[in-house]
Image: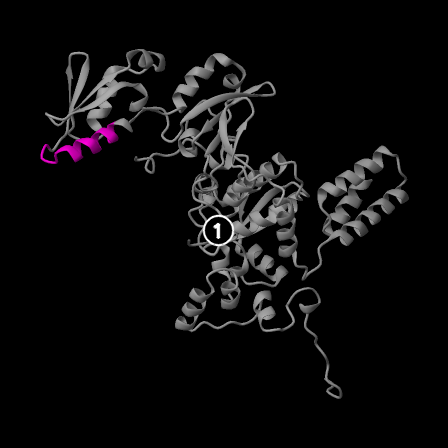
């Protein structure tokens, strides 16, 4: 009975979720057809009343909605989330970082979900973690030194640590030999001697090589420093500090449909602009919720939409969305006015005064609210 | 790394953050533009190399319809114009 009504109102542009609730509730309360119709009519009235009017300054409303609770956020950057000792940036610093669209978050983090059998049993964990967490050569060294007389590097491996991590000695030696090509590695007693390829460079070259060797990745995924398991309900998931979405998604045990990074640029690159929009929303929401604040999701959605309209992520900065503004005066009013004005006069830009700020500057009515519509009049005596 | 040549095992469209992307036909595109009384350049953009539209083989000038899950009203439609950079 209500199906026809739902369809009728859906055509009018009422969201389907609201209509579903209305029809379910009406059925539950056993309303008559006439009463149900009244409910739907009321719903339409309420919905239409709640709609934002054309010309409403929603940008200002959003700015205020973020601004006021923002004053109550913690300025302290670091926070240890829960039992898992992972360092996360939260509060205002994170929000700024997010909306400024910084290329790298100060604490990159990944939430890695696992596929069915692996997410239920702890016995798989160790193997999966060792697959993901990066192990550098410096993690398995017990000693490294430069032999000043011979211009060589000598290092000793920590055999116990290697056994724990399941790393074979031959593999390590092979990786070192390949990393800076042509490097020679020769065993000597219980240690190894590395001879650089060109011997003429002297000590600075040897020193650089030493640092390079220490940073060699032996195992795992580059960029992921630490992986900690976490229990969510009945499921086990992993929190990783450091981020490399692309390579983590390729691992067989990882549930790629849910795994996510807090680096929005990485999300954009791997999953696309729409996923990045979603990631911005989620990140902003978690920050705000964590602080015990309440900002309507619509404001966050608006910010995320704004940042992703150009197809790539643009921050709310002078190099981001502000630089996309058409009007010279509007751009100049944000930051670095002289730069914008000079550049505009050199290239001969025209300002059509279509937007708000430039009209405020010129003391004219702004195209917002009642200032937006123009009047069309018929001149007297001019009949068609 | 030669990751670019290797075909990725992971299907981007299965990720929960990636909504459904549909390429509009030329006819539907005109209808849309007429409905909102806009030119296609006024639509939000999506880059041609965006990972989420690779399977659609979309060209510059096409309009992509995106069916998003919205926390407020369930499902919404969004439109993006395929563009270079």
**Residue closer to the observer: B57 or A283:** A283
Q: Is residue B19 left or right of residue A158?
A: right
Q: Residue at x 81, y 52 (%)?
A: A45
The number of discs equals 1
Quarter of the image with the N terminus of chain A in it? top right
Tell me residue A123's x, y (percent): 48, 12
Q: Is residue A122 above or below residue A268?
A: above
The residue range painted magenta reads A199-213
Q: Is residue A377 above or below residue A336?
A: below
Tell me residue A320's x, y (percent): 47, 54
Q: Residue at x 71, y 55 (%)?
A: A52
What residue is disc 1 on? A314
For the stretch drawn in magenta, the main secondary structure is helix
A102 magenta-colored:
no
Which quadrant of the view contains residue A137? top left
Label 1: which secondary element: loop
Quarter of the image with the C terminus of chain A in it? bottom right
Q: Is residue A133 left or right of residue A379?
A: left
**Residue closer to the observer: B16 or A287:** A287
């Amino acid at each position: 009975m209500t199906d026809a009504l739902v369809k009728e109102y859906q055509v009018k542009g009422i969201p389907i979720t609201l209509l579903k609730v209305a029809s379910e509730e009406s059925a539950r309360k056993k309303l008559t057809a006439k009463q149900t119709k009244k409910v739907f009519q009321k719903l339409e009235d309420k919905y239409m009343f709640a709609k934002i009017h054309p010309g409403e300054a929603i940008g200002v409303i959003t700015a205020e909605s973020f601004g006021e609770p923002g004053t109550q956020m913690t300025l302290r950057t670091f926070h240890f989330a829960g039992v898992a000792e992972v360092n996360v940036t939260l509060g205002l610093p994170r929000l700024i970082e997010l909306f400024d669209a910084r290329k790298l978050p100060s604490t990159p983090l990944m939430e890695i979900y696992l596929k069915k059998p692996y997410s239920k049993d702890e016995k798989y964990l160790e193997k999966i973690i060792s697959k993901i967490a990066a192990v550098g050569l410096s993690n398995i060294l017990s000693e490294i030194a430069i032999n000043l007389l011979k211009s060589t590097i000598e290092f000793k491996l920590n055999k116990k640590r290697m056994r724990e991590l399941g790393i074979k000695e031959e593999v390590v030696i092979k990786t070192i030999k390949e990393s800076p090509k042509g490097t020679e590695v020769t065993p000597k007693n219980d240690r190894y001697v590395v001879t650089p390829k060109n011997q003429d460079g002297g000590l600075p070259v040897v020193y650089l090589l030493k640092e390079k060797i220490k940073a060699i990745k032996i195992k795992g995924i580059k960029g992921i420093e630490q992986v900690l398991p976490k229990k969510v309900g009945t499921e086990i998931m992993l929190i990783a500090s450091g981020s490399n979405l692309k390579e983590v998604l390729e691992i067989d045990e990882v549930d790629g449909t849910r795994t996510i990074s807090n680096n929005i640029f990485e999300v954009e690159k791997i999953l696309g602009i729409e996923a990045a929009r979603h990631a911005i929303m989620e990140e902003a929401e978690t920050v705000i919720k964590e602080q015990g604040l309440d900002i309507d999701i619509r404001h966050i959605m608006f910010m995320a939409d704004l940042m992703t309209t150009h197809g790539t992520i643009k921050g709310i900065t002078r190099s981001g969305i502000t630089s996309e503004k058409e009007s010279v005066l509007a751009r100049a009013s944000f930051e670095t006015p002289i730069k914008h004005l000079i550049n505009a006069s050199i290239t001969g830009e025209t300002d059509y005064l279509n937007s708000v700020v430039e009209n405020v500057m010129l003391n004219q009515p702004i195209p917002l609210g009642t200032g937006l519509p123009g009047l069309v009049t018929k001149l007297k005596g001019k009949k068609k | 790394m030669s990751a670019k040549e290797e075909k990725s095992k992971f299907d981007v469209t299965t990720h929960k953050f990636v909504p459904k992307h549909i390429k509009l036909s030329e006819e539907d595109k005109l209808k849309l533009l007429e409905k909102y009384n806009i030119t296609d350049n006024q639509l939000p953009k999506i880059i041609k190399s965006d990972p989420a539209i690779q399977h659609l083989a979309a060209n510059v000038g096409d309009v992509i319809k995106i069916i998003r899950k919205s926390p407020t009203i369930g499902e919404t439609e969004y439109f993006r114009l395929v563009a270079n950079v």
